Amino acid sequence: MNAVVKGMLDSAALRVAVWSLALALVALPVVAVVNGWIGAERWPLRTLRVQGDLQRVDAAKLRAVVLPHARRGFFAVRLDDAQAAVADLAWVEHAEVRKRWPDVLEVTVVEHRPFARWGGDRVLSEEGKLFPVAGIDVPASLPRLDGPAGQEAAVMALYGQSRELFAPAGFDVRAMALDRRGSWRLQLADGVEVVVGSREARLRMARFARLLPQLLAQRRGEALLRADLRYTNGFALTWGDPAQS
């Protein structure tokens, strides 16, 4: 290789090195800001703005989980991480975190609206979603529902129908369950257990609800403890002392 060619190559290599160094010097401050290495004190997030009607989400816990992310500053805050932290809080169905120039971190929270207890360890929301009981105070007034996975909508629907059927006679339904064999059972607010069965559930409940006041009137002084509706032409009823009910 002659001296002229070697000199040209060395000159090109030098230019590449210079440009690489220049680009690094330009990019390094940007990377440092974006990663929160510098600049957090220059572009701090001073305001936490919470959107949503918070009835059950603990506002203090919400601030506590957002604060470590906000400390990174406007440019370095990792919105996905902050959003995941908020979504993990009890009662949160959905969370969204945004930043607003120059110093606002905006958190939008949608709460679960409880519809019923589901089984022994979960709550069913009005949207038909299940979430765990752990770490939350479940309202004592919630009805108790249960059923196989994927049957939440069916249980909610028949529960609503059962309440409409028993309400005219002055009774409320406090619990309903569907077992793995497809058999239904419910419990009235006064403790009466009603076995509905797997066939024509709504029709059987309607017939029983219509006749219940008459059945009770015929056995004054006794309490109805259990009713089995799995009969074509009637019901199997279990009566007992009122003190047992």
Image (cartoon, helix red, strand yellow):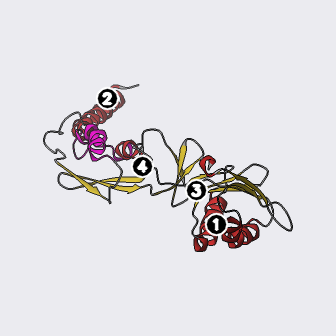
Q: Is residue 122 above or below residue 155?
A: above
Does residue 138 appear in this view?
A: yes
Image-based side of 236 in relation to 26, left or right: right
- Highlighted range, magenta: 58-81
In-front residue for pair 119/62: 119
* Residue placed under numbered mark 4 in the picture: 91
Question: Is the magenta region chiefly helix, strand or loop?
Answer: helix
* Residue placed under numbered mark 3 in the picture: 190
Q: Residue 162 carries which label?
A: 1
> Is label 4 in a helix, a strand or a loop?
loop
Residue occupying the far front of the picture: 221
Q: Position of residue 110 (x, y in %)?
A: 39, 57
Looking at the rendered structure, the kind of residue marked 4 is Trp
Q: Residue 183 carries which label?
A: none
Asked if the residue under mark 4 is in contact with the one under mark 1, i.e. CB atoms within 8 Å, the reply is no
Q: Compare marks 1 and 4 and give the one earlier in the sequence.
A: 4
